[in-house]
Image (spheres, rainbow, N blue to C red):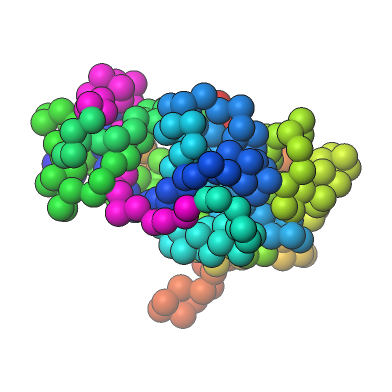
Amino acid sequence: MTVPSVPSSTWWRRIERDVLSVSGPDAVSYLQGQCSQDVAALEVGASTEALLLSPQGKIEAWVRCTRIDPEGFVLDTDAGSGAGALARLERFRLRTKVVLEPLDWACVAVRGPDATAVAQAPDGSTEGPSLMLAVAWPGYEGVDLLGPAPHGDAACAGWVTSDLLRADLATWDAARIEAGIPMAGKEITEATIAAEVGLVERTVSFTKGCYTGQELVARLDARGSNVARRLCSLVLAGDEVPPPGAEVWTADGSHESGMVTSSGRTGGTGLPVALALVHRRIELPGSVLVRWEASDGPTHEVVGEVRPLPAQG
């Protein structure tokens, strides 16, 4: 069953995630030197979010790292990022005793107050999920289920209770936008740094040892993460939804100051909502103008307000 976005309900959707296995005698020390987070401190069964950075400190992949045994980890990341993450890890592997391989796994996202109760707990079977991972999206807390990919959504439906509502793609994306979650290919590109998209606090350890790309992250943190642009929530007046790429201008229309990266309609009310990368000249919260060329020719202009991203749990 497909339903509109209703934040108070519990729903599921199969989402595209790329999944990798990292295993071997040197897996812990190797990932500790590559990831921005302290993966060596993870207990078996625990997970953390981390970044794989270029030597220049740009994001090459935002991963969730789950320790499955003393010498093994599963990394999952946004669809389309897996190949880059694998290539990035291979590039620095050298003679390390680590095996890297992609996994044909599926991910089922369950969001809502009853997420844990309605999701099928991992039981070791080949048909059910292998991992149940807590997700702390503001307003959309829940769990992600990961495991060997069954065939089609109908098979994944067996990972949740039979009466649970299945959300459509628009519902899923609206929840992500409302929760302020950046996504590879939209908010995150090869030129993005962690401080721009609100990922430092949730993905970076400042007490662990060195890792690739650390210098830029540490330098910006010492300066208060005062980057030229930052990802913001964008709430719009009226009923029009600006497309990704729409320009964000200062309220007086004098300076182009950002760009919409994702947009949709809020759960329940159906009002337009968006994420935008905005120049630091605009104080938060602050009024802006959003402009874009419509397919029929005229330029659309709507008033909006940029706000800080929701606090992440």
- Quarter residue 118 falls in: top left
Q: Nearer the viewer, residue 197 or 251?
A: 197
* Residue 111 counted in the magenta span: yes
Q: In the image, is residue 204 part of the stretch drawn in magenta?
A: no
Q: Is residue 268 visible?
A: no
- Left or right of 229? Residue 39 is left
- Decide which of 143, 279 is in the foreground and name it: 143
Instruction: Please give the name of the residue rendered at 29% of the width and 41% of the height, measured from the top-left corner.
Output: 147
Name the quadrant containing residue 277: bottom right
Q: Is residue 119 above or below residue 236?
A: above
Residue 285, image x, y percentages? 69, 39
Q: Nearer the viewer, residue 190 or 297?
A: 190
In-image side of 33 versus 50 (left or right): right
The residue drawn where x is 74% and y is 33% is 208
Q: Which residues are magenta?
A: 99-123
- Please give left or right for residue 14 compared with residue 254 in the image: left
Percent position of residue 124, x then y: 23, 30
Q: Nearest the camera: 295 or 84?
A: 84
Name the spot of residue 152 as percent of width and height, x first. Answer: 16, 53
Q: Is residue 165 above or below residue 244?
A: above
- Percent across and percent down for residue 240 are 44, 56
- Number of dots carrying numbers: 0
Could you tell me if residue 118 is visible in this image?
yes
Residue at the farthest right position: 223
Looking at the figure, which quarter contains the N terminus? top left
For the point 46% across and 39% down, the residue is 72
Q: Vertical placement of 75 versus 160: above or below?
A: below
Residue that appears at 69% across and 60% down? 54
Q: Is residue 127 left or right of residue 146?
A: left
The C terminus, quarter of image:
top right
